[in-house]
């Protein structure tokens, strides 16, 4: 496991199965699984639509990225979501597996 800082517990939210059209399967349910012993490295946030003094749709949006370091053996799919510290993030792509050291999961969040 990666060594640094305080450990936290993240919650993996596995989305319901989808049909060939991308719609949730009728009986599909979200499955939540706790992942203890994680570290979170928050990234830089950015306001959307406020560049160059332009007023555009979505001016009140804030985008943030981060990296979640999870224990070895953690399995997270690109379509899953992660809840940590009260916020819900999308998983960006596939996790990076660092052998027995742990798993690195890129996260993305948009609010507003």
Image (cartoon, rainbow, N blue to C red):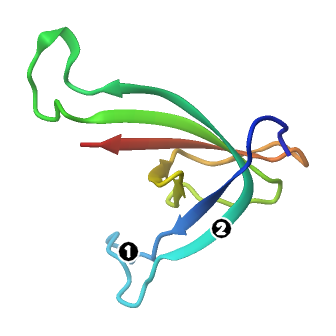
Q: Is residue 109 left or right of residue 40?
A: left
Assign a secondary structure to mark 2: strand
Q: Nearer the viewer, residue 61 or 15?
A: 61
Q: Position of residue 77 (x, y in %)?
A: 59, 59
Task: Tell which circle, 2 or 1, labels the residue nearer the N-terminal end.
Answer: 1
- On screen, residue 99 above or below 47: below
Q: Nearer the viewer, residue 43 or 86?
A: 86
Residue in the picture at 59% in, 63% down: 11
Assign a secondary structure to mark 1: loop
- On screen, residue 25 above or below 102: below
The C terminus lies in quadrant = top left
- Residue at the front extreme? 6
Residue in the picture at 43% in, 34% down: 64
Q: Is residue 76 left or right of residue 74?
A: left
Q: Position of residue 102 (x, y in %)?
A: 81, 47
Q: Position of residue 111 (x, y in %)?
A: 30, 43
Q: CA distance from mark 2 to mark 1?
A: 29 Å
Residue in the picture at 74% in, 48% down: 7
**Residue 34, which numbered label?**
2
Front position among marks 2 and 1: 2
| Crowd class of label 2 (few under 14; some 14 to 19; many from 20; radius 10 Å) | few
Q: Position of residue 35 (x, y in %)?
A: 69, 62
Q: Is residue 43 left or right of residue 22?
A: right
Q: Which residue is mark 1?
A: 20
| Crowd class of label 1 (few under 14; some 14 to 19; many from 20; radius 10 Å) | few
């Amino acid at each position: 496991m990666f060594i640094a800082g305080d450990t936290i517990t993240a919650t993996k939210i596995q989305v319901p199965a989808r049909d060939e059209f991308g719609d949730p399967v009728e009986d599909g349910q979200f499955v939540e699984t706790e992942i203890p012993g994680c570290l979170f490295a928050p990234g830089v946030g950015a306001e959307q639509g406020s560049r160059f003094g332009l007023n555009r749709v979505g001016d009140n949006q804030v985008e943030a990225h981060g990296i979640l370091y999870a224990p070895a053996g953690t399995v997270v799919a690109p379509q899953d979501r992660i809840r940590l510290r009260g916020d819900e993030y999308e998983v960006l792509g596939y996790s990076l597996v660092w052998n027995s050291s742990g798993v690195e999961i890129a996260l993305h969040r948009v609010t507003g």
